[in-house]
Image (tube, rainbow, N blue to C red):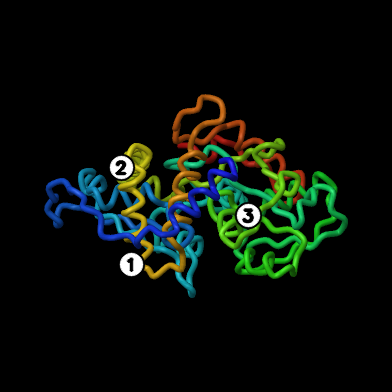
């Protein structure tokens, strides 16, 4: 997205009121006693990154599939991956690289729906300096992970980054404590823009444009749970895909649904950021070759991620596409 477009949205939408409860016509309710429970955990707090699942729940798409879906966001004492590993959640969103690491740890997984078709990862450096030319810079990354590909890229490209893990990458970068930061194009990048930071082109490294375009978010189940709940998994995936397709066709109504979730869970964000996030998430769902929403893992991207992570010592072995797709 052109930076002038981003800044225009930030300025023009700043005066918009907070979200009111959207007026949504919900399909006729299915008798609650006939619905099968399905606990699902997004990997982060409520935001537009997970809009399609909120749509599927609020518009009754899960009910129509006979499911009583409970969306459980991570909280301070237990993150989504921990819930998933322990079996507290039947399914969870994971990035492809997270899924590969879990399989490498000896827990077979099945991908039941893939939403991301492109990498959202960026490196943003100070003062427009080229992130690839910095000398021994301090680069901040998320304490909770999500930076596996960044570490692998830096190692492969022989960059002498000093990685610093923190809960908030934005605050330390804005404060001038580091030379560069990892960011997601749908989240931290917009947060940085909202602080007034405008980064010249040379100061922004997009992984997707430099040979590291690797899919991110998908929905995973353990292979054991998938075997036990294959029919429920297929119905959940079908309704979730329908939710994302509806979101792409009705972005304004979807934003209202997202803001309801944001307000319910008291997430410190704003409407402008969520609008931009939704637009970018939907853009990232378009396959780079076909331009369509395909909702599938790409074998070439699985192999690229697996080989890169194995070569850089993150994985003990290469993990194949066939291991992730039933």
First along the sequence among labels 3 and 2: 3
| Tag 2 residue | 239
Give the spatial CA distance, label 3 vs label 2: 30 Å
Residue at figure coordinates x 44%, y 62% from the top left: 270
Going by the image, does 212 lie left or right of 116? Answer: right
Give left or right: position of 256 versus 117.
Answer: left
Disc 2: CA contacts within 10 A as few (<14), some (14-19) or many (>=20) = many
- Indicate the secondary structure of the residue bearing disc 3: strand
Q: Are marks 3 and 2 in contact (CB under 8 Å)?
A: no
Disc 3 target residue: 183
Counting residues from the N terminus, which is met first, the one under dot 3 or under dot 1? 3
Towards the viewer: 250 or 296:
250
Give the quarter of the image for residue 90: bottom left
Quadrant position of residue 71: bottom left
Q: Are marks 2 and 1 in contact (CB under 8 Å)?
A: no
The residue carrying mark 1 is: 264
Q: Is residue 233 left or right of residue 105?
A: left
Are circles 3 and 1 on residues that touch, CB within 8 Å? no
Q: Nearer the viewer, residue 134 or 292?
A: 134
- On the rendered image, what quadrant is the N terminus found in? top right
- Is residue 223 or residue 290 the one in the foreground? 290
Horizontal side of residue 170 vs 152, given as left or right: left
How many numbered circles does the render carry? 3
Name the mark nearer the viewer: 3 or 2.
3
**Residue 206: percent from the left, percent from the top?**
67, 43
> First in sequence: mark 2 or mark 1?
2
Q: Position of residue 272 (x, y in %)?
A: 45, 55
Characterize the local packing of mark 1: few (<14), some (14-19) or many (20 or more) Cα atoms within 10 angstroms: few
Q: Residue at x 16, y 46 (%)?
A: 27
Q: From the viewer's perspective, is residue 208 above or below residue 53?
A: above
């Amino acid at each position: 997205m052109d930076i002038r477009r981003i800044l225009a949205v930030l300025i023009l939408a700043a005066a918009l009121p907070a979200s009111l409860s959207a007026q949504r016509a919900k399909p006729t309710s299915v008798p609650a006693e006939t619905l099968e429970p399905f606990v699902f955990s997004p990997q982060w707090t409520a935001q537009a990154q997970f809009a399609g699942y909120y749509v599927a729940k609020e518009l009754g798409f899960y009910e129509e599939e006979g499911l009583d879906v409970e969306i459980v966001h991570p909280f301070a004492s237990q993150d989504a991956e921990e819930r998933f590993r322990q079996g507290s959640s039947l399914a969870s969103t994971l990035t492809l690289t997270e899924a590969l690491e879990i399989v490498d740890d000896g827990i077979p997984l099945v991908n039941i729906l893939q939403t991301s078709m492109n990498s959202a990862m960026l490196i943003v450096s100070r003062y427009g300096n080229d992130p690839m030319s910095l000398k021994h810079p301090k680069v901040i990354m998320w304490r909770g992970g999500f930076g596996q590909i960044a570490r692998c890229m830096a190692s492969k490209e022989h960059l002498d980054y000093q990685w610093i893990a923190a809960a908030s990458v934005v605050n330390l970068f804005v404060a001038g404590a580091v030379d560069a930061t990892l960011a997601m194009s749908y989240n931290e990048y917009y947060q940085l823009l909202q602080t007034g930071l405008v980064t010249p082109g040379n100061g922004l490294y997009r992984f997707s444009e430099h040979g590291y375009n690797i899919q991110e978010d998908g929905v995973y189940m353990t292979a054991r749970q998938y075997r036990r709940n294959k029919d429920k998994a297929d119905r959940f995936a079908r309704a979730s895909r329908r939710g994302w397709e509806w979101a792409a066709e009705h972005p304004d109504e979807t934003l209202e649904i997202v803001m309801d979730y944001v307000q319910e869970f008291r997430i410190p964000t704003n409407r402008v950021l969520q609008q931009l996030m939704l637009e970018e998430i939907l853009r990232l769902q378009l396959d780079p070759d076909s331009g369509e929403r395909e909702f599938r893992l790409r074998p070439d991207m699985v192999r690229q991620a697996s080989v890169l992570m194995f070569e850089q010592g993150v994985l003990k072995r290469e993990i194949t596409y066939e291991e992730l797709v039933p």
